[in-house]
Every structure is written in structure tokens, then in C-alpha cells.
Amino acid sequence: MSNTLNSGSLAGLSMNSTLLVQARKVNGQKLQLEFAEVLQKESTQSVNPLAMFNAGDDRFSQTGGARRAWLTVEAKAATTLLGIDLSDNNDAWAIDAMGREVLPLNILNPVAIVNGEEIPLKVEVAETTQPNEYQLNNIETSAKRRGKDGAYCTHQGLYIFANTRMALHKANHVFLVMDAVETKTTGIPAGISAATGEIFN
């Protein structure tokens, strides 16, 4: 298992497979490596039978797409550890639609090569109720939600923030138990007449 360019894609990424999507030039003469991984469903959430019985239909997917993590690196060290050319001499560097210098990689299940040993790189999720400065200033867009436009997820009444980072060998995810969803029901309260609204004693 070595790092092979264009061996994977986001479109065909399967569960628990990692993709090294691209490298991007950032400040300080560093690169930012973008990783993606479709994670297995959190064990604290119930399985939806509707999704199970429609497994071939993307509209019923419960994976929520690939989780992303970014790793800021020195080009020389990353070139050595990944065994791929991330230098300015690589002709594949291009300008993306946002005007950033990027190097498309699309490496399926990337590894760091340390002393001849290939060590898998995995996306790791760490949920917390303590926001960083950016999350605190952008709660509407950074707090975890139940689906794209769903209710905010809370743990003991506090917003949940999902942070990602890269891990070697195996990811040790931290998923918080979400509070139950508040449901509002309609109907007639017990002890009240449906016809007259009179309260029974």
C-alpha cells in the first residue's frame, strides 16, 4: 500500500476509506493537506429502518457525506513522509476556482512512511461543548445540527461542536450523547372536554 496519485475520488469514497484530496499553499510557506473520510454511523444514534431498506438510494443516506480534516505541513517533510512530490517543481500545481494554488492528489487510503513502515492516516472526530473562538463567533454555522437545516444538537443542554483532526493508525472518535429532541404534540389535553373546552374535575 503506497500513496498512488488519483487512486480514489470523493464520488466513489466508501465507508471508512480515507482520501487525501489535495494540497493547498497557505501562509508561512506551508501547505495544507485536505483529507476526507466517510465515517461509520455513530453507535449512540439509532439506525433508521427507512434508510436500511433504501440503502441503494442516496436520498436516504445516513452518512452525511465525507468528513473533512486539514493538516498544515512543511512541503519538504510531507514529501518525505508521503513519498510524493509536493514541491513547487511539480507541474500539477494549479489555481482553483477560488484563486488558491492547489495540487490535486486524490490518494485513496494515504499512509505516512516512517522508518520504512506505512502508517495509515485517518480522520478523527472529537465532539465537545467548548467552542473555539471561531465556533463561538459563528454558532449558527458551526454548531452540530440534525441534518442540513435541522435542530441544533445539544449535550446536557449545551451546543455540540464537532472538530476533526488527523490520526495515525486508527481514529479514536469522541462522540457526545445527544439530548433527546423536544417534540411538540397537538391534541386535546387530558381532563378537558373536546366539545366544550370545559375542564373536568
Image: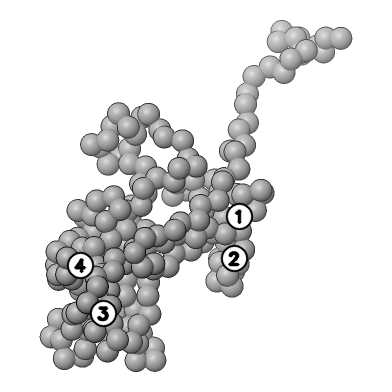
Mark 2 → mark 1, Cα distance in angstroms:
9 Å
Farthest right residue in view: 201
Which callout, 3 or 2, points at the residue further toward the start of the chain? Answer: 3
Left or right: 76 in relation to 48: left
In the drawing, what numbered circle is on residue 119? none
Residue 109, picture quadrant: bottom left
Specify the amino acid type for callout 3.
Answer: Asn
- For disc 4, the marked residue is 107
Which callout, 3 or 4, points at the residue further toward the start of the chain? Answer: 4
- For disc 2, the marked residue is 131
Which callout, 4 or 1, points at the residue further toward the start of the chain? Answer: 4
Which callout, 3 or 1, points at the residue further toward the start of the chain? Answer: 3
Residue at 61%, 58% in the rendered image: 129
In the image shown, does 87 or 103 lie closer to the viewer?
Answer: 87
Residue at 15%, 86% in the rendered image: 90
Mark 4 → mark 2, Cα distance in angstroms:
32 Å
Mark 4 or 2: in front is: 4
